[in-house]
Amino acid sequence: MRINIEIARTMLNYRLTILFLFAFFLIVNVANAQNFIGLQDVEMEELEDYEAREGLVLDCADFLLEQPFDEFERDRARCAAFLIRWMEGTDIKFVLGDDFVKLSDGSEESLPVYLAALVKAALSDEKTAEDSDRINEEARELFLDYCADESHNLKPNRYTRKLLKQRD
């Protein structure tokens, strides 16, 4: 009888330890995750609205440029949609050059990353925001930085691999 009580206590301690570890990891993941649920409800009608949202736009761009493309799928989609909506209404002119087509290949994995790179490049410096060629040059470098980081799990296309090799 004594052995059964000891076994029951050990099993209870084991289960409590597992439950504690699970709760700990859940709390850590939730605390580190950003919440982009309300982005579709953010109103942007006047130019001032677009300017006032630049901080949120940068948060979205940073999120897309920092996370692996195959994680946080819903938040990535929300951020990408918000960036597109913002890009359409801001007074910053985005001209998608040849690099956009060659680097992104129009793939749903790389497109949001490239758009985030464009936005981050445009908002990083006022002078850059006035020059679409500079925006594209800086966006290309940001996109290549993202692709060079294997933890992002984005398989670069042939053109991107060529440019990454040239950087080394």
Image (cartoon, grey):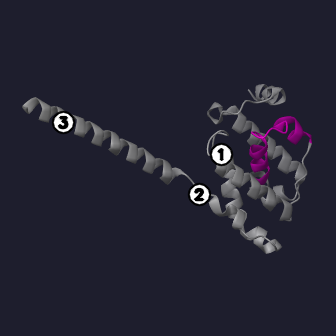
| Residue at the farthest front position | 1
Q: Name the residue beneath numbered marker 3.
A: 8
Mark 3 burial class by Cα count in 10 Å: few <14, some 14-19, many 20+: few
Label 1: element kind: helix
Name the spot of residue 63 as percent of width and height, x first.
65, 50
| Distance from Cα at disc 2 to Cα at disc 3 | 41 Å
Tell me the amino acid under the disc marked 1: Glu
Residue at image position (81%, 72%) is 45
Viewport quadrant of the C terminus: top right
User: Where's residue 33, x and y in %?
Assistant: 55, 51
Judging depth in this view, the residue of 52 and 32 nearest the camera is 32
Which residue is tagged 2? 35
User: Which span is picked out in magenta?
Assistant: 98-119
Which badge, 2 or 1, comes first in the chain's sequence?
2
Q: Position of residue 119 (x, y in %)?
A: 77, 54
Residue 12, image quadrant: top left
Q: Looking at the rendered structure, which numbered label has been put on residue 73?
A: 1
Which residue type carries mark 3? Ala
Q: Nearer the viewer, mark 1 or mark 3?
A: 3
Q: Main secondary structure of the magenta part?
A: helix
Residue 157 horizontal side relative to residue 96, left or right: left
Q: Is residue 62 above or below residue 157?
A: below
Label 2 sits on a secondary structure element that is loop
Cα separation, mark 2 vs mark 1, equals 12 Å
Vertical relation: 111 (above or below) 78: above
Q: Amino acid at mark 2?
A: Asn
Position of the N terminus by quadrant: top left
